[in-house]
Amino acid sequence: MLGGLRLAGLLALQFALLLSIRQASVGFSLWALIVVTVVFAGCWVLLGCWDRPAPAGPAALAAGLPLTLLTLGLLVFTESVYFTAGPYRAPDRALPALAFAVLAAGWLTRRRRTARLLLAVGCATFALFLVTQVRRSPTPVIDVWSVTTEAARALLAGRNPYALTYSDIYERFGWKGFGYERVFVYLPGMLLHYAPAVAVGLDVRCANLLAQAGGLAVFAWFVRRAWAGDRSWAGALCGAAATGIFWFHKGQVHLLEMAWAEGLLLFYLCLALWAWRRSEWLTAVALVLFLSLKQTAWFCAPFLAALAVKERRWRLMAGVAAGVGVVVSPFFLWNPGAFFHNVAELLMQMKPREDSLGWGAVCLRYAPGLSSWVAALSYVVLGGAWVALIVRLRRRSEQDALLETQKWMLLGLFGFFLFLKVSFFNYYYLVAGLLAFHLCVGATIARAADAPAAAGGQTHDMPGAAREA
C-alpha cells in the first residue's frame, strides 16, 4: 500500500513539474519556481529515502490514468507552438492521440512481432506530429536556432565555427537581446548532428525531432517488456503512465520549436542506461555522443564514472574518453583559444538572468548580495548527491546499482539547476525526462526485484530484470 502511494506521489510530482516549467517557459514565474522547489523536495523524500523501487498498486493507477489523459488532452486541445505561422488543424491535433493509442495496442498485444510493429508505428506517428508543429514555426526568434544553423553552414563551408561571430536574430526582428556574444558555445557533437540536415536543406531541428522519437521508443520498449514478461501488470500500466505524461506533454513541442538539444541528451543518456548491462560498445557510443553534445552532460559524468568504477568497467571508461577526444580534439586544435573561450570561458562568465527559473533569479531581483551564495549552493547539492551515490554503492552492493545511479544523478541535476545562476525550461526538461525514465523502469521491475529479495537472493540489475518471454 505504501509503495503504491509513493509511486502515485511521484507521478503527481512529475506532472506538476512538467506543467509548471511549461507555463513559465517564456519568463520568470515565482509561483512556478515554488512548485518546482516543492517537487524537488518531494522527489528527494520519495526517491532519496527509499532504497528500492516501489511496487505499483491501486493508488498509483488511480493517479496515473487521469494525469495521462489530462496531459494528452492539453496537448490535443491547446496551443503548444509559440511562434505560430499557421493554424493548429484538426488532423494535427489527432496525431498525438493516435500515436498513444497505437503504442497502447503495442503494449497490450501478446504477439512480439505485432508489438514491435505497433510500437514503431506509434513512435513514427509521434514524430509526424512533431513535424507538423515544426512546420508551423519555421523561423523561431531564438538565438539557439539561428546560431546553430549558421554554425553548421560554416562547418560545411570549411570554416571554423568557433572562430566566427553570427547574426543577431533578435535585432533582425526588432527585439531586445540578452547581451551575449553571437558565437557557437556548444560542444562539437552538436554540429556533427546538425550539419547533415543542413547539408540537404533541412532544418537543424530534424536531428532533435528524431532524438525525441527515439527517446519515446526507448521508454515504450520498457513498458512493453514489463507487460509481455508478466512481471507486474500494475507496474506496466504505471510505466505507461510515466511515459505518457512525459512524452505527450506540451513541452515536447516547445523544446523542439526552440531548437534546444536536451532531446538529444536525454535520448543518448537513456540509451546508455538501457545498454549498460547489454552491450558495452553501444553504451560507449551513446556516452561518447552524449558527452560531446553540450556542457550539461558533463555534470552527469561523475555519477556514471562512480558506477563504472564500482563495476570495474575500465575498458568502457577508456573507450568513452578516447571517443570524446576524437570528436572534440580536431575542433580544439583548429583554434584552441577560440574553442576554450566559447565552450568554457563564456559560460563561466555568464551573468545571472532575471528571467530564469531558479532561486538565483529571485536573489537578483530582491537580494543581489545573496546571488553568489545561492550559485555555490547548486554545486553543494550536486556534490552531495554524488557523495550519497558513492555511499550507497559501497554499502549496499546487492541493490540495483544502475537504478541507484540514475536516481541520484537526477536528484543532483535537479538541485543543481534549481540554484544555478541561469536555468530555463530545457534544463528542467532533462530532469523531468530522467524522473520519467526512473518511474518507467522502476515500476516495471519492482516485482522482479521483490521476488528474489524475499527469498534471500540478490536483486536484479536494470534492465535485465524483466525480460520479455
Image: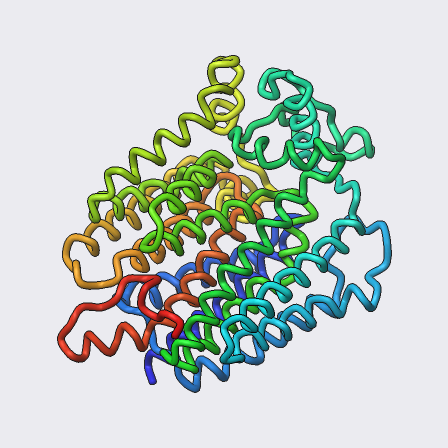
Q: 36 left or right of 311? A: right
- Residue 352 is situated, as x and y percent measured from the top left of the image, at 53, 35
> Could you tell me which residue is drawn at 56 percent across and 69 percent down?
244
Report the quarter where the C terminus lies.
bottom left
> Could you tell me which residue is drawn at 73 percent across and 53 percent down?
131
Q: Is residue 443 visible?
A: no
Name the one closer to the observer, 366 or 110: 110
> Could you tell me which residue is drawn at 61 percent across and 43 percent down?
260
- Residue 93 is situated, as x and y percent measured from the top left of the image, at 76, 67
Q: 225 left or right of 261? A: left
Report the quarter where the N terminus lies.
bottom left
State the image quarter where residue 192 is shown: top right
Specify the color scheme: rainbow
Q: In this view, does 340 lie above or below 87?
A: above
Q: Can residue 71 be seen in this view?
A: yes
Give the number of callouts.
0
State the image quarter where residue 130 is shown: bottom right
- Residue 63 is situated, as x and y percent measured from the top left of the image, at 50, 79
> Could you tell me which residue is drawn at 44 percent across and 40 percent down?
297
Name the one closer to the observer, 261 or 333: 333
Q: Is residue 64 above or below residue 422?
A: below
Q: Is residue 342 above or below residue 447?
A: above
Name the one closer to the observer, 120 or 251: 120
- Residue 242 is situated, as x and y percent measured from the top left of the image, at 50, 69
